[in-house]
Image (cartoon, helix red, strand yellow):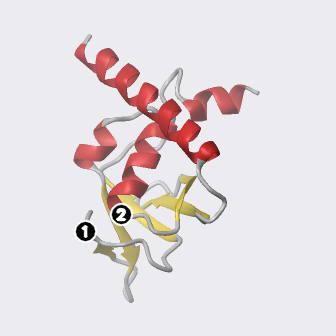
């Protein structure tokens, strides 16, 4: 039941965030960031502000998929020279990066999440 509570809180926060995005002045730029699973190659795209941090990307991913555990377990990184994941820290700025690899995260949408509902349409 605790997980359900977490999920509904997260989704409420998402709804609020999206409302803020719609109200936000047009001076704020948004960009599309693609997160690809390092093992099974599943990809998910999320929209974040261009001045976002890596944590903001994780949060957008967690909201979109309805998976709060992403905030705890997921490790985002970029593709290194040898194909290995080069970790990025939560506090780092997104900067010009638009593609990430992720480990220790389930990228399939939970029932009732925005991504799940979007897929049903």
Q: Which mark is residue 29?
A: none
SS of the residue under disc 2: helix
Q: Residue at x 24, y 47 (%)?
A: 73
SS of the residue under disc 1: loop
Task: Give the quarter of the image for residue 7.
Answer: top left
| Residue 112 pos. (x, y %) | 53, 21
| Residue 111 pos. (x, y %) | 52, 22
Q: Are marks 2 and 1 in contact (CB under 8 Å)?
A: yes
Q: Is residue 76 or residue 19 the one in the foreground?
A: 19
- How many badges with numbers are in the image? 2
Q: Local crowd at mark 1 within 10 Å, few (<14), some, or many (≥20)?
A: few
Seen in the picture, residue 62 relative to 29 is either above or below; the reply is: above
Q: Which mark is residue 54?
A: 2
Q: Which mark is residue 89?
A: 1
Seen in the picture, residue 114 relative to 17 is either above or below; the reply is: above
Q: Report how far apart the C-alphas of labels 2 and 1 lie in the structure.
A: 7 Å
- Position of the C terminus by quadrant: top right
Q: Is residue 39 or residue 46 the one in the foreground?
A: 46
- Position of the N terminus by quadrant: top left
| Residue 18 pos. (x, y %) | 56, 39
Asked whether, in this view, residue 52 is left or right of residue 68, the answer is right
Q: Residue at x 51, y 70 (%)?
A: 99
Residue furthest to the top = 1
Task: Give the quarter of the image for residue 106.
Answer: top left
Earlier sequence position, callout 2 versus callout 1: 2
| Residue 16 pos. (x, y %) | 49, 33
């Amino acid at each position: 039941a605790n997980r359900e509570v977490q999920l509904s809180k997260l989704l409420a926060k998402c709804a609020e965030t999206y409302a803020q995005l719609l109200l936000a002045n047009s001076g704020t730029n948004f960009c599309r960031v693609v997160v690809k699973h390092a093992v099974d190659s599943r990809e998910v795209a999320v929209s974040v502000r261009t001045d976002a941090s890596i944590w903001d990307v994780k949060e957008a991913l967690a909201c979109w998929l309805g998976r709060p555990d992403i905030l705890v377990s997921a490790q985002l990184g970029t593709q290194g020279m040898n194909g290995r994941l080069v970790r990025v820290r939560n506090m780092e700025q997104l900067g010009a990066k638009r593609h990430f690899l992720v480990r220790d995260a389930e990228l399939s949408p939970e029932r009732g999440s925005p991504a799940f509902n979007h897929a049903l349409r």
